[in-house]
Image (cartoon, helix red, strand yellow):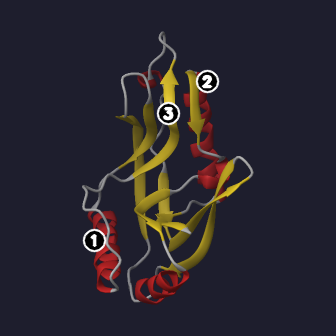
């Protein structure tokens, strides 16, 4: 199974983020946009995970003892993957609590032998992949208020294909105090 670690949103915040995604879609010629039920903040992508490793992950990540915390979104940004196609995301303010959570999870997974690619952590909420913005439009035209989000649990997610649709399913969660 393909897995990743994420923070999920309350229904109201999820709807607001999906409305922002709709504005991106409106100024796009094409793209693979995130389904409303799949919106999340990725902490760490793991990739292919065996059932045995999943059980180890559940046990090891349950050792994390962190308090609940708040974090905020900022503006629409993108990662450039080619000259015409980009990954569009809603940026999240870098705060020590998110960075500490990322580092804590990486450390715990290394302790059980799960290797993770070393990369700079950029907290973000993916809105669309392979997005092509209409020539006359710009992501700068989309205004979004700062959105206050709450981290109440860490979720281990599974990514599966159902028909032609990618579905993210929570397989385990660790509540924050």
Say whether residue 167 is left or right of residue 135: right
Measure how far apart labels 3 and 1 are at the Cα level: 29 Å
Q: Residue at point 39% right, 35% down?
A: 78
Q: At 24% from the left edge and 55% from the top edge, which residue is drawn?
A: 120
**Is residue 164 depicted above or below 152 in this figure?**
above
- Residue plotted at (48% across, 15% down): 137
- Neighbourhood count class around disc 1 (C-alpha, 10 Å): few under 14, some 14–19, many 20 upward: some
Location of residue 103 (image quadrant): bottom left
User: Which residue is label 2 attached to?
Assistant: 26
Say which label, 2 or 1, has the lower sequence index: 2
Tags 3 and 1 touching, CB below 8 Å: no
Read off the residue under disc 3: 130
Location of mark 1 (residue): 103
The mark nearer the N terminus, 2 or 3, is 2
Q: Nearer the viewer, residue 20 or 121?
A: 121
Circle 3: is it few (<14), some (14-19), or many (20+) Cα within 10 Å? some
The number of numbered badges drawn on the structure is 3
Q: Between residue 42 and residue 80, name the one nearer to us.
A: 80
Mark 3 or mark 1: name the one nearer the start of the chain. Answer: 1
Q: Depth-wise, is mark 3 or mark 1 nearer the camera? A: 3
Element class at badge 1? helix
């Amino acid at each position: 199974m393909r897995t990743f670690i994420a923070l999920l949103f309350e229904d109201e915040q999820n709807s607001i983020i999906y409305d922002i995604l709709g504005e991106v879609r409106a100024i796009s010629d094409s793209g693979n946009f995130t389904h409303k039920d799949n919106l999340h903040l990725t902490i760490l992508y793991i990739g292919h995970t065996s059932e045995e490793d999943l059980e180890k992950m559940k046990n090891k990540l349950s050792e994390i003892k962190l308090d609940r915390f708040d974090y905020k979104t900022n503006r629409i940004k993108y990662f450039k993957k080619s000259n015409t196609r980009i990954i569009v995301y809603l940026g999240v303010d870098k705060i020590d609590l998110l960075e500490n959570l990322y580092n804590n999870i990486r450390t715990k997974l290394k302790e059980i032998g799960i290797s993770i690619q070393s990369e700079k952590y950029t907290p973000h909420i993916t809105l669309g992949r392979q997005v092509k913005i209409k020539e006359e439009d710009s992501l700068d035209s989309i205004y979004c208020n700062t959105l206050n989000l709450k981290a109440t649990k860490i979720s281990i997610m599974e990514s599966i294909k159902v028909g032609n649709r990618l579905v993210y399913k929570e397989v385990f969660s660790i509540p924050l105090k």
